[in-house]
């Protein structure tokens, strides 16, 4: 049976763990590089990408995780997790894991008032996915190999490139488990 890991260095990891377990899958919190060997798919939660990026280095996970994802480990980054996966971050010199051919803009809706909720379609998932945005990034530019799965107000908020899935929003803060199902059933298998 598929075992899912949730990167648990910082941010909203607990909610992802609860949803994955609620769907009947095994799920573990990941804080050490060797724990990556025990999972078939990884969720990188929302939080604060600068802090999480630093913790990836401090905990000695960054390089091993990048290799695993390059080797095909399915990964889903929500919000800050999406920023960690991006190859390009607008107005910022450094990137983190640098694996997905997207350019993201952090706090793209403004810092203070940039939190809102909507329901919108996600290709392959549903026409009314619940989307809480919390100081969210969006994708400004996506490379040719990237499938755009959702656009809200002309901004790309969900996309997939092979084994990488990203969403700007936080489905784990709702009772809508369909994206978790999509990730586990379609990408982890
Ligand atoms: N604004 C955060 C960042 O840039 C992301 C916010 C979130 O994950 N909810 O890292």
Image: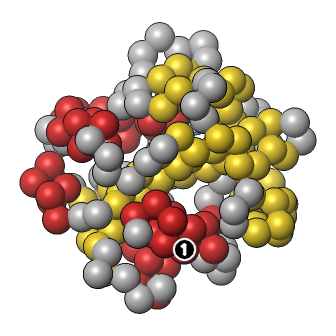
Instruction: Find residue 182 and report its horizontal and vertical position in percent.
Output: 57, 68
**Circle 1 Cα neighbour tier, 10 Å, few/some/many (<14 / 14–19 / ≥20):** some
Q: Which corner quadrant of the image does residue 84 belong to?
A: top left
At x 76%, y 69%, the residue is: 126
Horizontally, is 129 left or right of 89 in the view? right
At x 14%, y 49%, the residue is: 33
Nearest to the observer: residue 102 or residue 61? 102
Q: Secondary structure at mark 1?
A: helix
Instruction: Find residue 72 and report its horizontal and vertical position in percent.
Output: 32, 46
Task: Decide if residue 42 is in sight here.
Answer: yes
Work out whether 71 lies above or below 22: above
Question: Which of the image's four quarters has the N terminus?
Answer: bottom left
At x 61%, y 49%, the residue is: 167
Query: Residue placed farthest to the left in the image?
Result: 34
Horizontally, is 8 left or right of 76 in the view? left
Nearest to the observer: residue 184 or residue 63? 184
Q: Which corner quadrant of the image does residue 39 belong to?
A: bottom left
Horizontally, is 41 left or right of 81 in the view? left
Work out whether 183 lies above or below 108: below
Q: Which residue position holds label 1?
A: 181
At x 83%, y 67%, the residue is: 127
């Amino acid at each position: 049976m598929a075992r899912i890991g949730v990167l648990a260095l910082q941010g909203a990891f607990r909610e992802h763990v609860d949803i994955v377990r609620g769907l009947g899958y095994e799920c573990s919190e990941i804080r050490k590089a060797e724990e990556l060997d025990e999972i078939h798919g990884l969720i990188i939660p929302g939080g604060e990408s600068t802090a999480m990026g630093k913790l990836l280095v401090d905990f000695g996970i960054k390089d091993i995780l990048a290799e695993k994802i390059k080797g095909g480990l399915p990964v889903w980054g929500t919000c800050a997790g999406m920023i960690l996966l991006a190859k390009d971050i607008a107005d910022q010199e450094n990137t983190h894991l640098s694996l997905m051919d997207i350019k993201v803009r952090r706090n793209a809706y403004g810092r203070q008032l940039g939190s809102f909720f909507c329901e919108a379609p996600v290709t392959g998932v549903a026409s009314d996915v619940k989307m809480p945005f919390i100081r969210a990034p969006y994708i400004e530019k996506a490379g040719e190999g990237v499938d755009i799965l959702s656009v809200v107000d002309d901004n790309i908020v969900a996309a997939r490139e092979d084994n990488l899935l990203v969403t700007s929003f936080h489905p784990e803060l709702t009772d809508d488990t369909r994206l978790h199902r999509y990730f586990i059933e379609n990408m982890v298998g």
